Amino acid sequence: MRHNFLRRILGGILTGCILVTATVHAGTTQKDIDKAKDQITDLKKQKEDAKDQVDSLTNEKQGLESDLSGLNGQLNTITSDMNQLEQQAAQKEDEINTAAEDLKRSEERSAEQYEDMKVRIQYIYENGNQSVWDMLIHVSSIAEFLNQAEYTSAINQYDRNMLTAYQELTEQIKKQKKELEEQKEELTVLQQEKQKEQEKVNSLIEDTQKKIQESSEKIEDAQSDVESIDAKIEKMIEYEKQLEIQKAKEDATRLAAIKKQEQENRSNVTYAPAQSDAYLLAAIIQCEAWGEPYDGKLAVGSVIMNRVRSSYFPNTVSGVIYQGGQFSPVASGRLAYRLEQGVDSDCMSAAQAVLGGMSTTNCLYFRVNNGIIEGTVIGNHVFY
């Protein structure tokens, strides 16, 4: 009997050694998995931020392109206006040249008329008496004399009228030419203003095109960041998968050792729940299986109670739950938050059921089902 007692003590010491070793390996692997999950979560957040940046830059570029389209429309309008002004200015120049030619001809004709009139007046003045005497001698009657005098007077009046008409026409042409020159000057001012507008719009177009180019480069960089983050996420997912495989192998090795030890030293372990166990168990069930079917909640609770009854794990609910590296909600703080906020009725019901002796699985482990680990699948979890 004493020999059996010593064997039990020795077995317990050996079990403790195996447990410590397994816990260190499992804890380290679980921490790596949790760290990988956190990194993936962070990378996904970075990816979303990068995509938001791409969207923001794309919207900015589209706004700039809209501005550029508007500026090009303004430039087309200004160019059209400048072409019209140029045509009007050319037309005014032609009109001014025509007026200048008309003025020159009018001035020449006015001068000619003036010279002709002076010659006739001088002739009449110098030969006036003789002419009158000659007319008296040579005319056959007084009526003919009067007709000749009237004719001479009519010529003089005609000369004066023509000279006046040419002078008035000259003044009119001068006035018209001046008005045309003023109009051309106004057109020149408008052309200069349009030229300034064109230069301003061209400058804005150049700046906008530069900004669009910068936005395109930023979008390209941001898109490159998204692709780079995607590559990192893929690598981290693959790394997490390898960790899951490693963890599964460790769990399988440990599970085999546990089964072998329990076959050698099989005992019926009964557990008397503490008063706080139901609330704590319900909280971890909600953290791990919230959103899962009720059977999934019962299975999570059953795994915890199976560990409590196993000699390879702590023999209390709190000991199993808070064992290092076993449940990620403990390390992340989600369990503490849930304990503070309260638990829902389904999770509490599942906790009370398994504490009362219900067990829906004899498994000691469960994980999110990723198709790597073989076991019993309930909801989104695989139990093994």
Image (cartoon, rainbow, N blue to C red):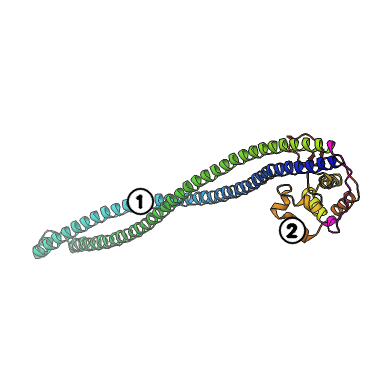
Looking at the image, residue 114 lies above or below residue 4: below
Q: Residues within 10 Å of mark 1 (few under 14, many from 20)?
A: few
Q: Amino acid at mark 1?
A: Gln
Residue at 38 percent of width and 50 percent of height: 87
Question: For the C terminus, which image quadrant?
Answer: top right
Residue at 67 percent of width and 39 percent of height: 243
Marks 1 and 2, how far apart in space? 87 Å
Which residue is disc 1 drawn over? 91
The mark that comes first in sequence, 1 or 2, is 1
Looking at the image, residue 268 lies above or below residue 349: above
Residue at 18 percent of width and 56 percent of height: 112
Contact, CB < 8 Å: mark 1 with mark 2?
Answer: no
In front of the other: 100 or 295: 295
Residue at 14 percent of width and 63 percent of height: 121
Q: Position of residue 69 (x, y in %)?
A: 51, 49
As drawn, is 263 to the left or to the right of 178?
A: right
Q: Residues within 10 Å of mark 2 (few under 14, many from 20)?
A: some
Q: Position of residue 195 (x, y in %)?
A: 37, 54
In front of the other: 336 or 214: 336
Question: For the N terminus, which image quadrant?
Answer: top right
Quick check: is 272 in the magenta stretch?
yes
Which residue is disc 2 drawn over? 337
Q: Position of residue 114 (x, y in %)?
A: 18, 60
Quick check: is 165 in the magenta stretch?
no
Q: Is residue 76 visible?
A: no
- Write down the region rendered in magenta: 263-279
The local secondary structure at tag 2 comes to: helix
Q: Amino acid at mark 2?
A: Tyr
Q: Is residue 6 visible?
A: yes
